[in-house]
Structure formats: structure tokens, C-alpha cells
Amino acid sequence: MITRKTEIQELEKYFEGEENHLILLYGREGSEKEDLLRTFAKNKPFFYYRCANASEKQQKELLGKKIEADYDVKLPEYTYEHFFDRIRSGNEKKLVLVFDEFQYLVKKDEEFLSHLIKLKKKQYYPGPVLIILATSSLVWVNKDVPLLPNQFEKQLDAKVMLPDDTFLDVVRHFPKYTTSESVQIYGIIGGVPEYVRRWDGTLSVKENVCKHILSKDGFLFGAAERFIASELRELAVYQTILASLASGNNKLNDLFLDTGFSRAKISVYMKNLMEFEVIEKVVSFETGGWENTKKGVYRISNTFVNFWFHFVYPHLSELYTIEPEKFYEKYIERELDAYLTRYFIDVCSEYLDLLNQIEKLPIKIAKMGTWIGKKGNIDIIAQNHARNSIVSLCNWSGTQISTKMVDELRERMKLAHVSADYLYLFSARGFDMDLSALAKKDDTIVLIDMNEL
């Protein structure tokens, strides 16, 4: 596990002191929250219960037996009163009480939360307790948690989200890989901690894709479809929409024409996918050039789901009939560079954000995004509160960045009604001689080679 220092520090803050606290901890499947909980619980009084997807009666039986086994007692009855009266830390230290995948318990038993709140208020076990409700269901967090009783929200002290690893985390995890190879990994599997941990840093990117994604015994073979099915029903509808999005149909009308589903149906299913954090609506950076801006653009935000539906899903027959290496060479290898451009922009944005945090930029960035135009995009626009701007071009594939490409960027800036106080030009292919000479004379033009990332 890549150490989640920020999240552990957040939990430690609530562990300290005598007050009781209630925390919601959540991260997508593969976030390895269990490893985080084990790390956090080390040398602390700790009771952990993994909720089953079971009936109310069976859930209480499982929880009761777990308490009896852990505390070597016999409970007179399997009720929350007896459960929470019996759980102890064993000393004066605060007890850490974890209900993992707690949504299974809450869905079947409405009484649980009210008893949990009584526990927090010291109406049962009198000692200090930190209660952690953990879940890997993003749909539950985004859709159902806001519908829980108001008293639960009032008693909730914090929501701690486990984000995916950053590009910098990925680079640190694979010290033998070049920057280019790290960008490729990041654009294929994203920063899902489990995926990063199981990726083999001794093999090439191609070898890993063939072994883990395209081979029938690979841990990521079919993982995108299993991930969708873990939270959503009517898989055929969702897969049709995702395949259409992955092929470039990024507006509702385009999806309507391509899938044959009604606009109303598409809207409902897209909403569910957004709650699952699989897709997102891309909002163009506000510059004032609205007449030249694309509106209502959608894309798959889950990196590996995007990779699977872009490269693999359209060729399932071949996936099962030809060797992984041949599949890679035929359907992935030639298109991969163009596909990774989007993720190179993400990497460059992360780099600017890091420079901003350590105050190594000429302005203090307050907001940053992409401008999506009808006649081309601007990869990055970053502004401070006074609307001074850094504008970036991120060149992943193709040729070196040239002065002509910068002139074309300036034309798009006119359409976007934005000017640049500074140009930060990122390139994986270098810069031509004229642009390099210009940058030496003009300190508002900053050239960043990919290896600097």
C-alpha cells in the first residue's frame, strides 16, 4: 500500500482526546481502505466488523458471534444494547470501532444508526470511542447517505475520502520506469492503489497489459465490467452508453443517435454513472468566449473503464480468439499515443498544482481547468484571483512544439477571450530551435521537457 499519510493524520486527529467521534470513511473498490484501517489501528484498542450482505437477523448473529469470540463472553441476547454495552477497549485508551461496508447493515436495519448515535453520546459503553463507518460503495455515499436521517448527519464529525493515487505516487512506485512509461501506466490503470500495487514494475508496459488485462487469468481481465456490475443493474444499457462515450460520442444527442435509447433514458443512466463516479460532465473554463465553447460534453472519468471500453470492449471476439500480444499490436499499440494525450494534460496539471503549492509559479493559482472550444481546445488555463493567467499547451505525441503551434494556440486564446501572462509549454517530444531561441529572450514563455515532470 502507498502510505496514505494525509488520511491517517485526519483519523489520528479524531482519535486524540476524550470526545467521541463518528467518521465516514469511503473510497472506491480497490482503494485498499482495509490496509489503511490496519495501519491506523496498530497499537490501538480496535474492534472491526465486516458487514455481510445479509438479512437483519443473520447480520446480528454474525456481529454477536464476532463480539463473543473477540471478548470471550456469552451474550444473553443479540441486540445492539448488548453489543454496545459489551464492547470495551480494555484500558483507558479510546476504542476504535469499525463497521466496514456498513451500507449492507443500514439497508436492512433502520435501528442501527439510532443505536450508534446513542453509543456516540455515551448512553451505552461509557469509555471514549472513535466510530468509523467505512464503505467502498460510491453510489451509496453520493446517493443514499444524504437521505439518511438528519440526526445522523448532525452527529457525523467528518467524511474522509480515499482518493486515487496521484501521478507522483505512481512515479515513486515504479522508480525503474521512465517518465514516458509512467504516463502510459497512469493513462491505462489510473491511480487505483490495488491496480498500482499489482502492476509488475519489472515488466514493460506492453507485457503488463498483455499479462494483466488481455490474458484470461489476468487480475484486470473483465475488471471494468465487473466494477460496473458491482453497483449498477441493467449492465447492457450501461455498457452500451460507455462504449458509445469511449468511441467519441460525448454529447447527449450523439449518444441518442448512436445508442437508439431515448434521451430521457440516457439522462437517467448517465446520472447513475456520475453518482458512481464513472463518467463526468466536462465544464469549460470560464473565460467569456461562450459563443465558441462546446457545452454539455461528457466523458468517462474512470481511467481503466475508459481504457477497457475504448480498446478492448469493441473487439471482444478477438480478445477470446487471438493471443494477447497480437491483440495489443493490432488494436492498442498504434492508437495508444493519441489516446494518452488526455492523461498527459492531467499530469501537466498536477505538475502546475505542485509548483503552485510550493510557490514556484509567477502567480498564485486560484483555479485551473481546460477550455473546450468548437474549433479546438486549450489544454490548461490557470488564473489567480486577479485573473492573471498561465496558459499551457501539452504536447504528448507527434512532433516537437514549434512557433507555429504556439501561434495556433494564440488563435484559440482569441476565441476563448483569454490572454496569457505566461505560457507554460509541456512537451514529450522537445521544442524546435526557433521556439527555444524565443523562450531564451522572453521570460514569459516557459518550456518544460517531459522528463522534468
Image (cartoon, rainbow, N blue to C red):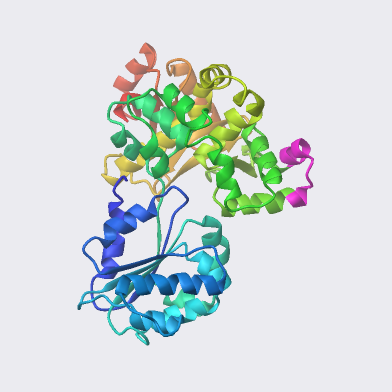
Residue 423 lies within the magenta run: no
Relative to 444, 248 lies left or right: right
Query: Quadrant of residue 435 in the image?
Result: top left
Point out residue 157 in the picture as x, y percentages from the top left corner.
Answer: 38, 72
151 and 356: which one is in front?
151
Decide if residue 135 is in sight here.
Answer: yes
Where is residue 296? Give x, y as percent: 65, 45
Does residue 128 appear left or right of residue 240 in this picture? left
Residue 124: percent from left, percent from top: 36, 85
Q: Taking 262 as reference, is 62 left or right? A: left
Counting from the top left corner in percent of width and height, residue 207 is at: 43, 23
Q: Would you place residue 236 above or below residue 322 in this image? A: below
Q: Is residue 140 left or right of residue 85?
A: right
Which residue of the protein is positioned furthest toward the bottom in this rendering? 123
In the image, residue 255 lies in the stretch drawn in magenta: yes
Q: Is residue 449 visible?
A: no
Q: Residue at x 32, y 31 (%)?
A: 453
The residue lying toward the viewer, choosing from 271 and 26, is 26
What residue is rendered at 51% in x and 65% in y?
A: 103
- The main secondary structure of the magenta stretch is helix
Q: How many marks?
A: 0
Nearer-the-camera pick, 265 or 54: 54
Q: Which residues are magenta?
A: 253-265
Q: Residue at x 58, y 53 (%)?
A: 231
Q: Is residue 402 above or below residue 305?
A: above
Q: Residue lying farthest top? A: 433
In the depicted structure, whether residue 415 falls above or below residue 44: above
